[in-house]
Image (spheres, grey):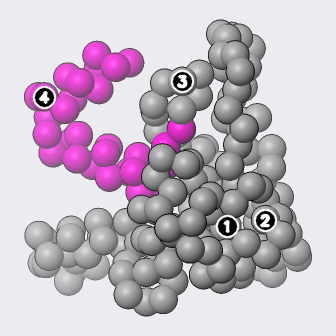
Amino acid sequence: VAEVLFSLHDHYPQKWRKLDNYIHGYGYPDDYLGMESHIVDPGITTFANHGCNGTNNIGMDLGGITELSLDPNGPMPEPLSAPASATVFHNPIAERNYIAWASTSDKTLRDVRAGEEVLDNYLAFENEEDWKEHLTELQASCLGQAAGLVVQVEASKMEQHPKTHEEL
């Protein structure tokens, strides 16, 4: 798979950018088995936006922890930081079912009305390495000081191809 992706990157840069935008816009970084990767969940949570200031209606119950209640210069709170695994081993069954297992904490936190936007708390997806940067981005987005990644990509597309978007 890696060889195909590298080939796409080298020989088809425009197609690579589209794939890269999709992966980073709708996916999330992961380090399953110690290897850095990005995962795009095939379920509905792929299209969940961040619920600012605790307005999420799906995901994990973080006990009132929100992007606005945290200091980016402080430590990552206990419920968000996963304990480091003492041993990493290869398990083919776990590997095949990893995405299903990883989303087992996804649940509705209250009744969701028909037509209501699905909102998650993106803090649950953070890792200690990128904690400060991602928390700062969420805070800026929730305070209306910056747009999220998908909005930035879409705005960039409209600037590059204004006629295409005007016709839509």
| Residue 144: image location, x then y, percent | 43, 89
Instruction: Give the class, few, some or many, for how many residues have Cα within 10 Å of label 2's Cα (few <14, many ≥20).
Output: some
Whole-angstrom CA distance, mark 4 to mark 2, is: 42 Å
Mark 1 or 3: in front is 3
- For residue 84: magenta? no
Q: Which mark is residue 62?
A: 2
- What is the C-alpha distance between the residues marked 4 and 3? 26 Å
Q: Residue furthest bottom?
A: 144
Residue drawn at (69%, 16%), measured in percent from left and top?
A: 87
- The residue wearing badge 4 is 10
The x, y position of residue 63, in whole percent, is: 83, 69
The answer to whether marks 2 and 3 mark residues whose Cβ atoms lie closer than 8 Å is: no
Give the residue number, with chain letter if any, for mark 3: 34
The disc labelled 2 sits on which kind of residue?
Leu
Range drawn in magenta: 1-30
Q: Which of the two labelled residues, at mark 2 and mark 1, occupies the earlier sequence position?
A: 2
